[in-house]
Image (cartoon, rainbow, N blue to C red):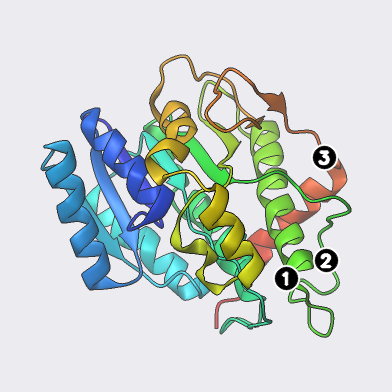
């Protein structure tokens, strides 16, 4: 039985993806921060899929210590991961610093994902894993603010979102450069406008847009399920830029120097837990 791990899997796209993979017969390990919500999500996934091989781990990945704790919890449950769906996400309209002194959106949306891959590398390699980012296109003029990753004194919601989205694309690009496709693959897909809880902390206009045009998580997760489980996914470093259209993909190709620099800086950050 193949094992899939879903970070941020107790709601929205993560939960919908977990449900679909459970229906395909995967053993599914769902990560969440809130115990009761996560337990309830697992019960609902089991009920909807008919698959009892669904478990959960609880971890607060807003800190680097929490990211390490998440990896250790997963290691206690499995030594092999065949699919890792990175679905942690948040949209913040105000500046919040994490316990490690980083902008909270960057921590949850990007660094926790990098940490999951880094700390679970052995288990992922053993399972020849398919790693999937739930994401969005990069924003125009987005960059990585290496001299001020926390965006202290210069935070805007769009600047933060731009940095976080670009970081996940750069991670995908650099991973494909460093890890051969016959060992593991990592790809990223545009989830589109989906009706999930991620908009709750965003502004009124964003929430209105989601309510008007958003699709259900069950529909929005189709590319995640495809990238995580389809036998034809032997490619790596690609962005599926059309929601619901897995055949449409483009190679992720941003600044190679920036991608390498972000990878190295991320490794440094993971060593600096408070």
Which label sits on residue 222?
none
Quadrant hosting residue 31: bottom left
* Marks 2 and 3, the one that precedes in the sequence: 2
Dot 1, how many residues are within 10 Å of its Cα: few (below 14), some (14-19), or many (20+)?
some
Residue 194 in the image: x percent, y percent?
A: 51, 48
State the residue position of label 3.
Answer: 254
Mark closest to the chain's N terminus, 1 or 3 = 1
The answer to whether 9 is drawn above or below residue 152 in the figure is above
Residue denoted by label 2: 146
Foreground mark, 1 or 3, reads: 1
Q: Earlier in the sequence, mark 2 or mark 1?
A: 2
Q: Quadrant of the N terminus?
A: top left
**Relative to residue 93, is residue 130 drawn left or right?**
left
| Label 3 SS | loop
Alpha carbon of mark 1 to alpha carbon of mark 3: how far?
Answer: 22 Å
Q: Are marks 1 and 3 in contact (CB under 8 Å)?
A: no
Q: Which residue is mark 1?
A: 157
Residue density around tag 3, few if under 14, some if 14–19, many if 20 or more, within 10 Å = few
Horizontal side of 153 relative to 242 (left or right) equals right
Residue, x 47% and y 53% (percent of image)? 195
Q: Quadrant of the C terminus?
A: bottom right
Residue visible at 21% across and 71% down in the picture: 36
2 vs 3, front mark: 3
Secondary element at tag 1? helix
* Of residues 25 and 40, the one drawn nearer to the viewer in this rendering: 40
Q: Are marks 2 and 3 in contact (CB under 8 Å)?
A: no
Give 218 or 115, whichever is nearer the viewer: 218
* Mark 2 → mark 3, Cα distance in angstroms: 16 Å
């Amino acid at each position: 039985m193949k094992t899939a791990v879903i970070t941020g899997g107790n709601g929205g796209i993560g939960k919908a993806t977990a449900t679909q993979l459970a229906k395909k017969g995967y053993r599914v390990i769902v990560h969440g921060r809130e115990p009761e919500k996560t337990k309830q999500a697992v019960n609902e996934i089991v009920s909807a899929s008919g698959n009892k091989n669904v478990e959960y781990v609880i971890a607060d990945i807003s800190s680097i210590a929490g990211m390490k704790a998440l990896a250790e919890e997963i290691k206690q449950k499995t030594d092999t991961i065949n699919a890792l769906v990175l679905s942690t996400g948040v949209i913040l309209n105000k500046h919040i610093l994490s316990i490690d002194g980083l902008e909270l959106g960057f921590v949850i949306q990007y660094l926790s994902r990098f940490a999951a891959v880094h700390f679970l590398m052995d288990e992922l390699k053993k399972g020849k894993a398919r790693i999937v980012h739930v994401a969005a296109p990069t924003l125009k003029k987005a960059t990585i603010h290496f001299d001020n990753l926390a965006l202290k004194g210069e935070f805007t919601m769009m600047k933060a979102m731009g940095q976080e989205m670009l970081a996940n694309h750069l991670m995908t690009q650099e991973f494909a450069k460093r890890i051969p496709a016959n060992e593991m693959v990592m790809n990223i897909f545009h989830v589109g406008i989906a009706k999930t809880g991620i908009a709750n902390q965003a502004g009124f206009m964003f929430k209105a847009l989601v309510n008007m045009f958003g699709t259900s998580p069950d529909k929005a997760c189709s590319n995640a399920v495809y990238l995580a489980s389809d036998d034809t996914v032997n490619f790596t470093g690609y962005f599926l830029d059309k929601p619901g259209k897995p055949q449409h993909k483009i190679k992720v190709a941003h600044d190679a120097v920036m991608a390498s620099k972000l990878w190295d800086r991320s490794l440094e950050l993971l060593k600096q837990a408070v």
